[in-house]
Image: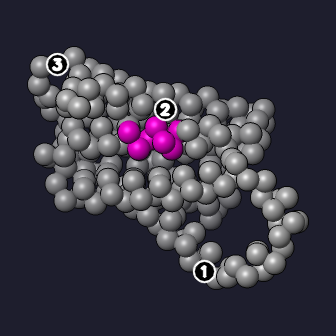
Amino acid sequence: MSSTAIVRLSSIASLLVGVLMVVFNLLSLAGLITPTQDQPRALFAIVLSVFAITGIYAVQAHRAGVLGLVGYMALITNLVLNAGVRFIYTFINVDLFATKFPQVLEEVSMGSFTTVYMAVTVIFVVGYLLFGVATLRSKIFPWGSAALLMFYGLYNFLATYLGLPPQVGSIAGGISLIWFGLALWAFERKPTLQPHPAV
């Protein structure tokens, strides 16, 4: 697959996942959908996000350096782990499973579960912050898209422990991905990818 095709597909994925994040989180914030109803959308969005983030990184890899690579790997790791959780909630009735097979849950170590959850949370915020900083330093994408991406990661991390509505951070993340998608679409139409001018 050519680099042009990769950028095009990443642009479409970024735009689509961004729109899904904004629309569904606005509906959730308004109380029109429940977290259970949002699970299929979230799983689909995670799959799209892998393509989107990969395209964004590919465009700026030559300038992002080690910081960008570490941020990218952290983001992909988080997305893969998150996809596993979303898959369970989408295709398995967890409450019914707990009723039918309580002995399975009794054998699960809550301490281990907490440790894994904390690790995923840390990977989440570190990934978005490092990737955002690397994007700012590369000066290829608009600085606002990178700033919103970092806000998304930091806000959702704080929301986990401070009881803030996570939809706010997800809406910001959606706007960020729409912005990235538009930038990727513009890049795809150029013969060569040029750094975005600093604002």
Q: Exactly how many numbered labels are in the figure?
A: 3
Q: Is residue 49 magenta?
A: yes
Residue under numbered circle 2: 18
Image location (x, y in percent) of residue 77: 41, 59
Give the residues in magenta: 45-51
Observer-nearest of 119 and 157: 119
Residue under numbered circle 1: 112
Please name the residue shown 27% across and 44% down the image.
Answer: 57
SS assignment at label 1: helix
Please name the residue shown 57% across and 56% down the image.
Answer: 84
Observer-nearest of 72 and 93: 93
Mark found first going from the N terminus, 3 or 1: 1
Q: Amino acid at mark 2?
A: Gly
Mark in the foreground, 1 or 2: 1
Q: Is residue 44 magenta?
A: no
Image location (x, y in percent) of residue 79: 47, 52
Labelled disc at residue 190: 3
Quadrant where the N terminus is found in the figure: top left
